[in-house]
Amino acid sequence: MSEVSQDDVSGWLPPDRLEWVRRKLPIVYVEAVPVRVDGAGNVAQIGLLLRADRAGGLSRALVSGRVLYHERIRDALLRNLEKDLGPVCLPRLPVAPQPFTVAEYFPTPGVTAFHDPRQHAVSLAYVVPVDGDCQPQQDALDLAWLTPDEILEPDIQAEMVPGHAALLRGALAYTGRY
Amino acid sequence: MSEVSQDDVSGWLPPDRLEWVRRKLPIVYVEAVPVRVDGAGNVAQIGLLLRADRAGGLSRALVSGRVLYHERIRDALLRNLEKDLGPVCLPRLPVAPQPFTVAEYFPTPGVTAFHDPRQHAVSLAYVVPVDGDCQPQQDALDLAWLTPDEILEPDIQAEMVPGHAALLRGALAYTGRY
Amino acid sequence: MSEVSQDDVSGWLPPDRLEWVRRKLPIVYVEAVPVRVDGAGNVAQIGLLLRADRAGGLSRALVSGRVLYHERIRDALLRNLEKDLGPVCLPRLPVAPQPFTVAEYFPTPGVTAFHDPRQHAVSLAYVVPVDGDCQPQQDALDLAWLTPDEILEPDIQAEMVPGHAALLRGALAYTGRY
Amino acid sequence: MSEVSQDDVSGWLPPDRLEWVRRKLPIVYVEAVPVRVDGAGNVAQIGLLLRADRAGGLSRALVSGRVLYHERIRDALLRNLEKDLGPVCLPRLPVAPQPFTVAEYFPTPGVTAFHDPRQHAVSLAYVVPVDGDCQPQQDALDLAWLTPDEILEPDIQAEMVPGHAALLRGALAYTGRY
C-alpha cells in the first residue's frame, strides 16, 4: 500500500481506493443551497448549476462535495462553494454546525428521498447566502439564478439531479417558503 | 378609547396600555447576539452593550426588543440591531425563521432560566453576524467586542443582565463553543 | 377596569379586551403537527382535525392555540393538544424550545405565507408524536389520520385552513419527507 | 481482496481495513444524550455510562457509535442506544434528521472542541428520551442517572470522556438549561 503515504496529506484517495471505500462506509458530504438575499435576509434567488450528466443529458444541481480527511465542515463548504461558483463568490458561511437537514443518499432507491447509485452518503445541508461574483466553474455549463417561484415550477424541478429537487424544497421550506 | 386610533399605524402603544397588556399576555420579543465572524464563519468576537440599569449600576446586554404589531421578525431584528448598534451595522439577517432557542422570561423567578419582573416575554433568539461599523446608541454607554473566551470569564458573566448570561452561553453552544 | 382583577389568575382575557389587544400587539401561539410514529421515529400518519369554519364550510386543521400569560410553551402545547385530541392523547412534548419553524400570521394577506384576518400571530410550530388514544373534542367533527402521501394530495391540501397547508408541508420537509 | 465479499452485507469492516480507512476519510457517527423526561417534556435526568478507558482509568460517556454502510441515521441511533442501554430501553427516536449539533472529532487536538486520536469523526448529535428499562451492557460498568444540576458539577464533568463534557453542555443548552 505504498500509495497510502502519497495521499496522506491531501485527504484525497486514489480512485480505486475511493471506489472500494464507497461500498464499505457512508461518506460525509456537504451540500449548499446558494442564495442571493436582500437586506432583510429574504431569499430573492437561488443559484442552480447546469451540468452534463453521466447519461449525456443536462441536469441542474446544487453545490455538493465530499468532506475530506482532516477538513472541517465549514472549510469543506467554503472549498466546494468556491470550486463551483468561483473564488470570489464570497459565501456567508453558517455560524453554527447545525444543518437544516441531513440528506441520506442510499445506493438502493426508495430507502430515503435520496438515491446515489455510487455510494451511501450522509450529507449535511446548509442554505448559504453568497454576496460576490459567481461564475460557473470547470464542468458546469451555466449558473442560473431563479426566484423561489421559478424554481418550484415543475419543468425546472424535473431538470434537477433527483435528490436535489427534494433538498431544494426542504431548503425553501426552512426559509419560510413552503 | 380615542387614543387607540392614534397608535394604530405605528404599532406602538401608550405606556399605560403597554403596562396593562404586559400583565395580561405574553409579549413577543427578538434577541440578537451580534458577532464578528471570520471568512470561514467562525465567531471571532461577540458584541456586548454597556447600559445603566434601573438600580443605578451598569450591566452588559445583548440586543433585545419587542416585535411590533404588523412587523415581521426579520424587520424587528433589523430595527432593533440598528437601534442598538447604529444604522450602518450591516447585519446578516437569518435566512430562516427558526431561532436557535426561545427564551421564556417570566415575572416569577425560577420558572425558567429567564426572569423579567415587568412581563412575560417570549423571545426568539438569533446569532447575527454584523459586518459594518457599530456604535453604541442612545442609552448605551459602550459597546465592547469580546472573544468567546473573554466573554465566558466569570467577572464578565456577572456583569450581564441576568437572562443574557444564559442566552449567551446558549448562543455559544449553538455555534460550537461549549 | 374592574374586570382586570377577575381574569388575573387565569390568563384569559374578556372577549372585547382580547379583540382590542389583537389589533395592537402580535399574539403568541403554538402549533402542533400531531403524528403517529413507528419504533424508529418515522412518521407513519399525521392527525388532521375537521372543523366547521366561519363561512359555514368544513376545513381541516392542525392543533393550534394561544399561549396564555404566565404559561410556558410546553404547557401551552400540552393544554392545546389535550383540548383538541383529548386528555389521554399522551403527547411526546419536545425536549427543546427550538421550533422547526415560526409561522407569522398577518392580518394583511401576502406579507408572509400565513394570513389571519383577526390578528397578527407569531406561532411556534412543533411536530409532536402522540402515543395515546385520540378523540376529536368540542368543535371538531372528526380526527383523520393520513399518511404523508395521502396528506399531500391536492384535494386534502385544498381542504385545509390556508396557513396550515403550508405549515404541514414545512413539517413534512423537516421530517425528511419533501 | 477476498475478505471484501465477506463483510459486504453486514457493513462491518475487518479491523485492519477500518484502521486504514480511519486515516483516510471522516467517519460518520451518531451520538445520543439519553434523558428521562417528565410529562411536559422537561429533562429530569441524563444517563451516563461508566467505562474503563484505555489508560486503565474510569470515565463517563454518552451513547456513541458508528453509522454502518447502508444504515439510516435513525437505525444507527436505535442500534447504538440498544447496544449501550439494553434492548428494552425504548428510545423516542427523533422525528427529524436535523441534529442539535454536529461534533467534529479531529485526530489533532485544538482544531475543534472535540478530539479523537484514532480518527476524524463527524458525529450527528441528538437528545433522546428513553422510556424503558435501561441496563449497562457489555463493556459499561454502570449507568448513572443524574439531574442537570448534578451533571454540571465540576467533578462529574472532569470524569467525562473529553468531548462528551462539551457535547453534554451543548445538549443541555439546547434543552433550555444553560
Image (tube, coloured by chain):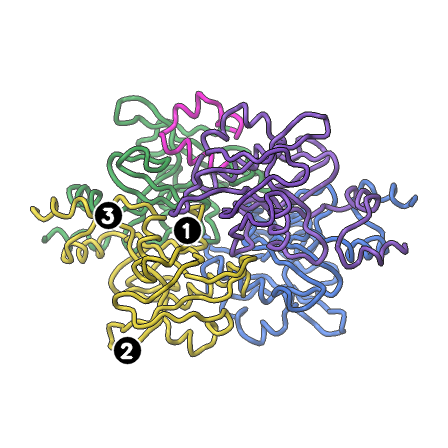
Chain colours: A yellow, B purple, C blue, D green
- Disc 2 marks a residue whose amino acid type is Gly
Q: Nearer the viewer, residue A93 or D46?
A: A93
Residue B98, given in percent of the width and then of the height, sits at 54, 52
Q: Quadrant of residue D163?
A: top left
Please, what secondary structure does the residue beneath circle 1 have?
loop
Q: Residue at x 51, y 58 (%)?
A: A174
Tell whether A60 sits left or right of D44.
left
- Disc 1 marks a residue whose amino acid type is Leu
Extent of the magenta region: D147-172
Alpha carbon separation for disc pair 1 and 3: 23 Å
Chain name for mark 2: A
Q: Is the stretch drawn in magenta largely helix, strand or loop?
A: helix
Q: Nearer the viewer, residue B133 or A159?
A: B133
Chain name for mark 1: A
Residue B145 falls within the magenta-colored stretch: no
User: Is residue C45 visible in the rendered structure shown here?
Assistant: no
Q: Quadrant of residue A60?
A: bottom left
In this rendering, do the residues under marks 1 and 3 share a single chain?
Answer: no
Check contact, mark 3 vs mark 2: CB within 8 A. no
Q: Which residue is mark 1?
A: A93
Q: Which residue is mark 2?
A: A57
Q: Nearer the viewer, residue D86 or C172?
A: C172
Badge 2 or badge 1: first in the primary sequence: 2
In this rendering, do the residues under marks 2 and 1 share a single chain?
Answer: yes
Chain name for mark 3: D
Question: Quarter of the image containing the C terminus of chain B?
Answer: top left
Q: Which residue is mark 3?
A: D25
Circle 3 crowding by C-alpha within 10 Å: few under 14, some 14–19, many from 20: many
